[in-house]
Image: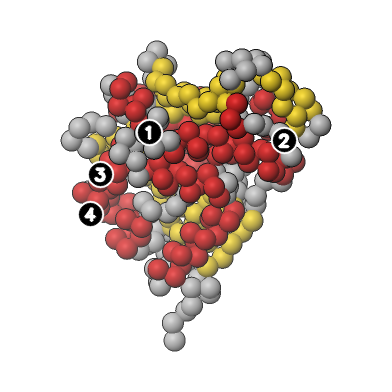
């Protein structure tokens, strides 16, 4: 008798309270230079809009990373080792992890995502699709302290962190995120991570300003979410999506720019925005191979293998935790 997908699927809700969301939003929008954390992009609507972005002609990272993984899957599996415990912080639509699951045959898969309903749907689909796979889905903010609810102490733990999500963090923050992942995988653990590379600014600017307008919708959905969940009164038509590559800082900056002097009320608190004042919603830092490996070393990882596409657009790295004695 075979196990049903419901028997192989477990869901653990560690989702932040709405009060945390409210406090973060009010604090960010009250700052001298207003900002919203990009982790709040990913409600159900935002997650689906990001799927559309990934399919856009201009948005090279997804298809390039997928191509790298596909063309090097045997090498990747050999290095990661079969029967590992596979952990995916910020799992999203789980498209990329499908490339690994059959080849890697992990003892269990732990997707972690902040978007509760989206995570539940994706995790249940995977449990039904991969009839041998145990799926332990965790709704949580992976950038904070996180206790994994499922452990196999004798098993090699590997984190999968694709999509150059690490680029959303300033370098000093990125070190902290990598340190959190190091805690997840433990002393003998590893990390397979996608990292976007520095390149000509025209390619980057086009990627974050797609002709179909999905990135603009994705960006403005932050305001729609704040209206819906916090009772705010943002007028989405009075903010423009604005994204550009900052060549001095090697990063894309994504903003929502106010089209006039205006007031917005959130939970009874009035906030003022001047004409052309912007709300920072995302950084996407771009690295060289060397600068990323230096960052990884600061977090306690060593580079084992790096794969890059033929055009030098994107990179995939396998890192291992450096044991304390070797630091």
- Which of the two discs, 3 and 1, sits closer to the camera? 1
Work out whether mark 1 precedes mark 2 in sequence or the reverse, and give the earlier one: 1
Q: Residues within 10 Å of mark 1 (few under 14, many from 20)?
A: some
Q: Can you tell which mark lies on residue 281?
A: none
Q: Is residue 324 visible?
A: no
User: Gap between marks 4 and 3, in whole Å?
Assistant: 11 Å
Judged left or right of residue 116, residue 181 is left
- Residue assigned mark 2: 232
User: Gap between marks 3 and 1, in whole Å?
Assistant: 23 Å
- Residue assigned mark 3: 68
**Front-lying residue, 206 or 32:** 206
Q: Residues within 10 Å of mark 4 (few under 14, many from 20)?
A: few
Q: Are marks 2 and 4 in contact (CB under 8 Å)?
A: no
Residue 64 in percent (x, y) is at 28, 41
Work out whether mark 4 precedes mark 1 in sequence or the reverse, and give the earlier one: 4
Residue 18 in percent (x, y) is at 72, 44
**Secondary structure found at label 3:** helix
- Asked which colour scheme the image uses, the reply is secondary structure
- Residue assigned mark 4: 74
């Amino acid at each position: 008798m075979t196990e049903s997908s419901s028997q192989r699927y477990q869901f653990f809700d560690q989702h932040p309270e709405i009060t945390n969301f409210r406090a973060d939003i009010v604090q960010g929008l009250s700052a001298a230079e207003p900002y919203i954390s990009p982790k709040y992009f990913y409600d159900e609507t935002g997650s689906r809009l990001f799927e559309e972005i990934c399919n856009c002609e201009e948005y090279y990272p997804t298809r390039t990373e997928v191509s790298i993984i596909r063309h090097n899957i045997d090498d990747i599996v050999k290095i990661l080792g079969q029967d590992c415990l596979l952990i995916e912080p910020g799992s999203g639509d789980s498209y990329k992890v499908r490339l690994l699951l059959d080849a890697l045959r992990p003892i269990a898969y732990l997707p972690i995502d902040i978007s509760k309903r989206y995570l539940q749907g994706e995790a249940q689909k995977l449990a039904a699709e991969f009839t041998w796979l145990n799926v332990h889905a965790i709704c949580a903010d992976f950038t904070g302290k996180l206790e994994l609810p499922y452990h196999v102490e004798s098993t090699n733990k590997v984190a999968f962190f694709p999509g150059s999500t690490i680029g959303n963090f300033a370098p000093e923050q990125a070190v902290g995120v990598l340190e959190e992942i190091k805690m997840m995988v433990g002393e003998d653990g590893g990390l397979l991570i996608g990292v976007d590379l520095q390149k000509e600014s025209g390619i980057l600017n086009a990627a974050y300003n797609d002709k179909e307008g999905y990135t603009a919708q994705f960006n403005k959905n932050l305001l729609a979410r704040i209206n819906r969940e916090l009772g705010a009164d943002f007028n989405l038509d009075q903010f423009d999506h604005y994204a550009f590559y900052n060549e001095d800082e090697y990063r894309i900056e994504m903003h929502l720019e106010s089209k006039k002097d205006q007031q917005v009320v959130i939970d009874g608190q009035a906030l003022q925005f001047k004409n052309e004042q912007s709300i920072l919603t995302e950084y996407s830092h771009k690295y060289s191979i060397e600068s990323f490996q230096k960052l990884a070393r600061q977090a306690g990882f060593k580079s084992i293998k790096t794969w890059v596409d033929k055009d030098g657009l994107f990179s995939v790295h396998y890192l291992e935790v450096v044991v304390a004695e070797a630091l």
